[in-house]
Amino acid sequence: MISFLNRHKKPIFIATVCIFLASILFMAGNFLTDSTAGVVANVGGKKIMYKDFTTRVNMVLDNISENGTDINEIIRNGVKQEVFRDMIVEEILSSEAEKNGMEISDFEIAMEVQNTPYFKNEGVFNQRLYYQTVWDRLHMTPPEYEAWRKKARLASKFKEFVYSGIKVTPEELKSFYLASNKGSLKNFEKEKEEYNRKLAQEKFLNTINYHLQRLTTQVEVKSYLKEREEGR
């Protein structure tokens, strides 16, 4: 099973999602209208469709199952919540990227598609295999798949932009190392690169979380997950 989510997700961002969502007050729909039929969430006027949500949930569950883990209700519900959070964050950050003039070209998406191993036959991109795979595995048409990839890459570009502005001073690094090693600098020279990365990641999480909290004061997020799961 294709593990697209795992290939494109940055591990250091997972913790941010959990921190960020604690600050969101979801406004669940109390009644259904034509405008919310089939919608699992509305983020600033942009709809996240339930069919896209279930597709991504199944992708993750299939990947977990193929790694030898039995799927139970606890795992299933946990995956649903994680995917739901990820899709909301993706929508918020891709919109913010657009507002800041960032874009993903059709050429970039074409190159990603053509270089994806799952769409190759004997090392060569195969269009028929591409169409068949995204439909059979993801229940998407090629335009739907490419629109998703563009949105995901746009959100990633915003995170990369934030990360590129993270700086760690020598003083910050030394203080961080001392705090992590009970005041000892014994192996500082040998381990400073590793600790520099750790501190940069920590600062990134704090910074991106600040951006997300700021953005949620400007974006209305409505959840219809409960209604969709209950078949309403």
Image: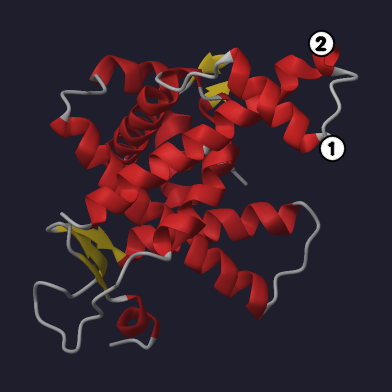
Q: How many marks?
A: 2
Q: Amino acid at mark 1?
A: Lys
**Where is residue 10 drawn, in percent x and y?**
54, 36
Kindly report which numbered mark, 2 or 1, lies closer to the viewer in this rendering: 1
Residue closer to the observer: 148 or 187: 187
Q: Nearer the viewer, residue 105 or 127?
A: 105
Left or right: 56 as drawn, with respect to 41: right
Q: Earlier in the sequence, mark 2 or mark 1?
A: 1
Circle 1: is it few (<14), some (14-19), or many (20+) Cα within 10 Å?
few
Q: Which mark is residue 229?
A: none
Kindly give the residue lying farthest to the top in the view shown. Answer: 189
Label 2 SS: helix
Mark identifier at residue 182: 1
Q: Is residue 134 visible?
A: yes
Residue 77 location in percent, x, y?
Answer: 56, 74
- The image shows residue 40, relative to residue 46, as above or below, that is below
Left or right of residue 64, residue 39 in this image: left
**Residue that sits furthest to the front in the current view:** 183
Q: Secondary structure at mark 1?
A: loop
Q: Which kind of residue does numbered mark 2 sit on?
A: Glu
Q: Position of residue 17 (x, y in %)?
A: 47, 53
What residue is rendered at 76% in x and 30% in y?
Answer: 178
- Kindly identify which numbered label has been placed on residue 189: 2
* Residue 27 locus on image (x, y percent): 23, 76
Q: Quadrant of residue 88?
A: bottom left
Residue found 43% across the figure and 66% down from its top: 22
Q: What is the basis of the colouring in this image?
A: secondary structure
